[in-house]
Amino acid sequence: MSDYYHHFLTSMAGVGGDPTLSQHDASIPVQQAPVLSLGTTPMSPAYQNLGGVFNGYAEPIMFSAPKAQRSRRKSAPGLDHIKHRRTRSGCYTCRSRRVKCDETHPVCERCRKGNRECVYPEPTPPKGSVKDSSGQSQQESPTSSRGDDDDDETGHDGSLTPIMAEDEEEEEEAESATMQSSTPTIPPTPLSAPATSLSFNHGSINDRQGLEGDVQFYLNYYCDNITHYHYSVVNDHDNFFKEMLTELAIQDEGLLYAVVGFAAYHYTLQSPIGEIKDFLHFYNRSVTLLLRFLKRKERHTEMTLLTILQLATIEEYLGDWVNLMGHQKAALEVLTKLYTPQTVMQTVVGRMILTWYTRFDVFTGIMASSETMLPREWFTAFVDYYEARAAENPNELSYKTEVCSGRLRMISMEMSLLFGRNARQQMTEEEYTAEHRRLYNALHEWKNSWDSALVNPEFLVTDVSMNGASDTDRIFQPLTPGLLFRPPLFASTILTCEWNSITLMHGSQGTSDPSSETLEKLREHAYVICQICEAVETWPLSPGGSLIILQPCLGIAALFVPQEEAYQLWIRKKFALLERMGYISPGTMRLRMAELFRDESCLRWWLPNDEGFTSILQSIRAFADERNAMAVSTQSENLRQIRSVFSRMNIRRTAMDQGEGQLSDGVNTMLLE
């Protein structure tokens, strides 16, 4: 793999010292996280220049390998060898913030001054073994064994061990032993009883030998609570995320800790005593193991690719689209080495990998006004495969759903190509208008070509609990006819919401300012999105994670709902709910929403009086803000300026404020079409 990804992972895990030194002189101080303020950012017109804001997405990062690689300097006779090298044993908080840690125990100086949680790596176990809670040892997996990689500066468990000057080793070893004895390991505290045995196709987790107790606990939690909707995947016919991913993870340490870290992240947010360290050390361990594997230059496998994609998903939840794109580029490289458009569709793992990757590819492409990284034939292969399966199995709803999802992703990919070419001025206005019109027709043809089995009225939800709220308290009614389908057609609800979102984005990208009639249509699409979100949240039987998959749709709809206090409060409640579910809104998005709502309080939290802003959420938000700021700062030399996808959304507030009356008639017409 390209050296850029090695360098990128090194900066992520803190391996190799201060990551900023790879691109900046050591004398330049590390930039601290910016303080968000409306007073320092010009108020832009509503809906203008918001590309690079939705989901906190910034301009694309062009990662490149550093010109100079790190090297160990050996002492030689007659020469003064270097003493007092930087150590690699700083606390997780400083390393994640990408600043130097003075390693003061039990709380370093930076964490003390910033009133942050200070967590140090756990004591390093004996080389070549990992102990579980019962004291049994497990040999390293093939992807995490050290082999000949003596240059790696990490402990086996993924913690970062010190690199010491030769004449200080004995003294440091004694001091390290003292520190380890005074720093107890704190196991995760479950919300309820300890995890119970969970059945799999090939046995239960508790039957697996050699798993640490906390790893086993979080794997059980993952299987009980995480769904494919948490990954923004519409359909999972083969139960890949519920069963296969965990089975694969048990076979590979890097993937294991990435999956466990994702589960621990969600668990931590729900725990009344959750702490950042409860998931951060798993994440760091996965990054370190992946880096170690890549350094050995062994053949990449599906496990490698799955690990990268899982780490990218964690970055998305932390609102870190800069680091996500680093993983995405690496995933593309591995994907195209392992598969062709034809072979990727031959296995369950390959098909889900393609679905997982293309979701990132399309979304970042559209939001950045750049083409997708994966060529068209990969998207076509997906649609062709499921069209053939649907023809062979006409009663299989899952295949029909995949066909619909794949076709919509194809249209989204073509939108990405259009916006990218136009941003680079590679087409005339007439060519853009013609292609824009073609995509408009394609979107509506897609909506009208659904198999009738996917909208079978027998599966419509007609009884949604109001959770104590009366109809008059609701801005968006969840019981609109044709809105919410129960399984096995729940995916139809998700696809309808995504279609409205993509149509809304497409409609906003015309060659001229939208007319009042166009604005009314756009507002109707936004209204449908909000109704679906209300229905999914309200219905007590909605699958876990199903509101998270709708987050991008809601982010677009927020730009077009009426600019009235009641609507804005509704939007802010949804953003707050999504963050409590773990989907962090980056500072850039909060800043633009504050401009849109003309309320600076959004910069701290969405709701008055910090309602729902738990202490663990505040810690994670602060951690994510600082980390995101450092990621942008570290890669700032590689940023390139491009036109935002929202550059055409020069919509005057006065135009949007016209006709703010009830939209239900128009919305109902759209739903029933």
Image (tube, rainbow, N blue to C red):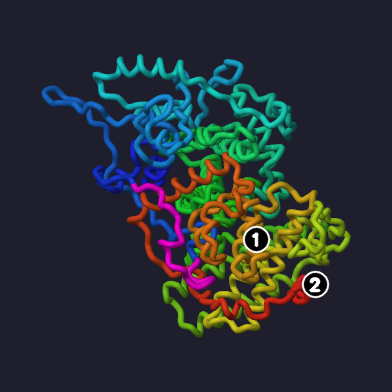
Region rendered in magenta: 31-50
Give the SS element for disc 2: helix
Q: Is residue 225 visible?
A: yes
Of 376 and 323, the residue lying toward us: 323
Type of the residue with mark 1:
Leu
Image coordinates for residue 623, horizontal then vertical, percent: 48, 43
Q: Which residue lies at the image location 35% right of the left edge and 55% below the top edge? A: 636
Residue 143 is tagged as: none
Q: Earlier in the sequence, mark 2 or mark 1?
A: 1
Residue 672 is tagged as: 2
Would you name the residue on which mark 1 appears? 569
Type of the residue with mark 2:
Leu
Magenta run includes residue 48: yes
Image coordinates for residue 177, horizontal then vertical, percent: 40, 15
Q: Which residue lies at the image location 77% right of the left edge and 54% below the top edge? A: 538
Magenta run includes residue 26: no
The N terminus appears in which quarter of the rendering? top left
Q: Which residue lies at the image location 27% right of the left edge and 29% below the top edge? A: 85
